[in-house]
Image (cartoon, rainbow, N blue to C red):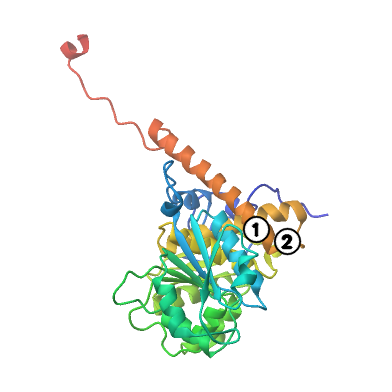
Amino acid sequence: MPERRGVGFGRRDASETSSGGSGPERDGDPDEAPWPAGAVRLDEDLAASLLPERPVRGHKGAFGKLLVVAGSLDYAGAALLVCRAAGRAGAGLVTLAVLESLQPLFAAKVIEATTMALPEDDVEEIDPEPALARILDHEHDALVVGPGLRPGLATAELVGRLIVAPDDAASPPLVLDAEALRSLATMDHWWEGDRRPAVLTPHPGEFQRLRAGSGKEPADDGDLVSDDAARALAARDAATTWGQVVVLKGARTVIAAPDGQVAVAPFENPALATGGTGDVLAGAIGSLLGQGLKPFDAARLGVYLHGLAGDSVRERIGDAGLLASDLPDPIAIARKRLAAVAERRASAGRLGFGSREMPPAPATSGAEADR
């Protein structure tokens, strides 16, 4: 019987534990895939350093107002998962924007989040122009757009309008997931012009559709499921082309920034291969954007919290049977864990442990020494 790896909160691939820290490939389990060259390995210390501050005198308005444009009659659960994950990741206020005919249904399901009605021009068909006006008029620090939205031309038009940075107002960042990504894939040169800062969170299939829509043959990217080097290269190229942060989901999720930086999460967890877990990730990243993190930081921290939460559930129930609704609560616990790591590091720095060598004592004359 083969030896099983040790477990603990945040079980990761064996190569991460070989030498700790973040950085390029390290020696580890010979059966492990090599780490992508030039990619930074996400680890506990790096993730802890990204945590937004949580002032003891803060209030709900100080911890981010997130607006979630998500959900439909067929995919109500996606919107609910986003909202719950956003709250567990630390958002102070979450508002769910849904079609006005569905607002009573969703209002009965969400507890902590508020709801906002979006105008329709047909049954369950959003009216893009007045919906956009209502969204822009709502006070928010970040947006999540896409999970569970009904496919169609009206949805695509709204997504196309939302990614444009308003001329007369600040441009809160947004997370684009699911139907928002499928809408982008239908638009020529959607990334050109003045665009809001965004985090795109595609799985490999959505990523390939986006790449095809921007003139890239999917076959040229190689194996985007099992080849970590190909995944990192493709995500980096997409992020620099589109000028947005790209989160290529899957085992060892890749996070790529427009400036060419690439980070890779160490998690490989088959229990997460179930519907709705991507909605939880979108909510976590959107929450962190609303709390003031920059897109690349919010994406890296959100991915790490999501991975820790997934591993904690896996340790309790195994490789199968995880439900997306199992994840939000462990996200809060994972954040607490990282906060403790950050506090230990800060305390060590204040006390001088492990920060740097002590400077040599200044030379003194005999008279000075006698004083």
The CA span between labels 2 and 1 is 8 Å
Q: Which residue is mark 2?
A: 322
Query: Residue 122 appears at what percent x and percent y?
Result: 57, 88
Query: Residue 93 appears at what percent x and percent y?
Result: 49, 58
In which quarter of the view is residue 193 placed?
Answer: bottom left
Query: Residue 192 appears at what percent x and percent y?
Result: 36, 84
Numbered disc 1: secondary structure = loop
- Whether the residues at callouts 2 and 1 have beta carbons within 8 Å, the answer is yes
Q: Is residue 111 visible?
A: yes
Q: Residue at x 55, y 56 (%)?
A: 87
Out of 198 and 77, give the one closest to the viewer: 77
- Indicate which disc, 2 or 1, sits on the residue closer to the N terminus: 2
Query: Residue 132 appears at what percent x and percent y?
Result: 43, 79
Q: Quadrant of the C terminus?
A: top left
Out of 151 and 41, give the one closest to the viewer: 151
Q: Which residue is mark 1?
A: 327
The three-letter amino acid code for the residue at tag 2 is Leu
The number of numbered badges drawn on the structure is: 2
Residue at the far top in the pictured view: 370
The three-letter amino acid code for the residue at tag 1 is Leu
